């Protein structure tokens, strides 16, 4: 990457908390109660996924309710049109599971942080050198924290976060390996979107918050 390549920093709250919760619901209306619990437990960054029907339409309401205390990003962005719409509804950051330098350029031009996914050194470096805010090691469960340590050899400045299969112990290990944050879904959310105990969700969220704050 050349010194004049623009790069937009990740939102400060996401970086300070070192934890992003990936929320996949059956429908967008299910976000409300879960986000209320997450925010109350200290979660300060939530990625709302486009695999949840109605995310775009419901996003402004969530932003109005939670946007002052937590970063709300839009994830599973897989098209230029969806990226543009995510920018238009006010996403604090964007996440895509794929490597696309075109997406990085589009998000950077719009002034919104973007975290593209990738697994191989070639994929991760392509996004990083194009100006990504950070890169998402995905699926992280297939490699493990030692992989990030290996990447630090050729890419010492790489800002990376793991996503996919990161549990409580894994969160601690990835952060110790140098991840800027961890992206966590199922191990934290559990059955919260299918009628699960929200008190238990609160406890799990607090446990992750405490581990990531160390």
Image (cartoon, helix red, strand yellow):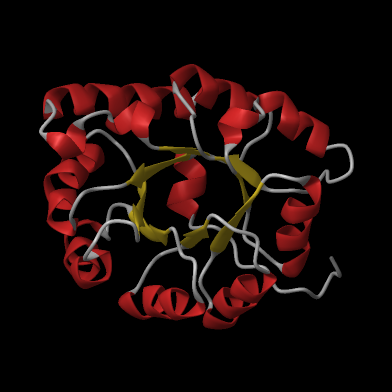
Question: Residue at coordinates 74% horizontally, 54% vertically from top-left?
Answer: 123
The image quarter containing residue 6 is bottom right
Question: Residue at coordinates 70% horizontally, 67% vertically from top-left?
Answer: 131
Up-down relation of residue 192 to residue 157 (above or below): above
Q: Residue furthest right?
A: 154
Q: Residue furthest top?
A: 169
Q: Where residue 176 appears, x then y in whole percent? A: 64, 24
* Relative side of 186 to 55, left or right: right
Depth check: 103 or 32 in front? 103
The image quarter containing residue 85 is bottom left
* Relative side of 200 to 69, left or right: left
Up-down relation of residue 46 to residue 193 (above or below): below
The image quarter containing residue 114 is bottom right
Question: Residue at coordinates 47% horizontally, 29% vertically from top-left?
Answer: 212
Numbered marks: total: 0
Question: Residue at coordinates 86% horizontally, 70% vertically from top-left?
Answer: 2
Q: Where residue 90 appears, x then y in whole percent? A: 34, 73
* Relative side of 115 to 14, left or right: right
* Relative side of 47 to 27, left or right: right
Q: Quadrant of the N terminus?
A: bottom right
Q: Where residue 24 appears, x then y in whole percent? A: 30, 47
Up-down relation of residue 149 to residue 173 (above or below): below
């Amino acid at each position: 990457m050349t010194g004049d390549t623009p790069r937009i920093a990740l939102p400060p709250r996401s970086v300070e908390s070192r934890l992003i919760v990936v929320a996949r619901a059956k429908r967008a209306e299910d976000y409300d109660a879960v986000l209320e619990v997450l925010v109350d437990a200290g979660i300060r960054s939530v990625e709302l996924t486009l695999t949840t029907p109605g995310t775009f339409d419901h996003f402004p309401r969530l932003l109005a309710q939670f946007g002052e205390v937590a970063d709300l990003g839009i994830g599973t962005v897989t098209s230029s049109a969806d990226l543009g719409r995510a920018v238009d509804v006010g996403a604090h950051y964007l996440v895509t599971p794929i490597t696309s330098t075109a997406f990085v350029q589009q998000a950077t031009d719009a002034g919104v942080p973007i975290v593209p996914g990738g697994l191989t050194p070639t994929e991760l470096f392509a996004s990083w050198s194009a100006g990504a805010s950070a890169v998402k090691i995905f699926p992280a469960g297939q490699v493990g924290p030692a992989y990030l340590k290996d990447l630090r050899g050729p890419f010492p400045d790489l800002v990376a976060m793991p996503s996919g299969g990161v549990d409580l112990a894994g969160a601690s290990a990835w952060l110790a390996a140098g991840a800027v944050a961890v992206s966590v879904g199922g191990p934290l959310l559990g059955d919260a979107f299918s009628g699960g105990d929200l008190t238990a969700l609160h406890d799990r969220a607090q446990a992750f918050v405490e581990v990531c704050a160390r």
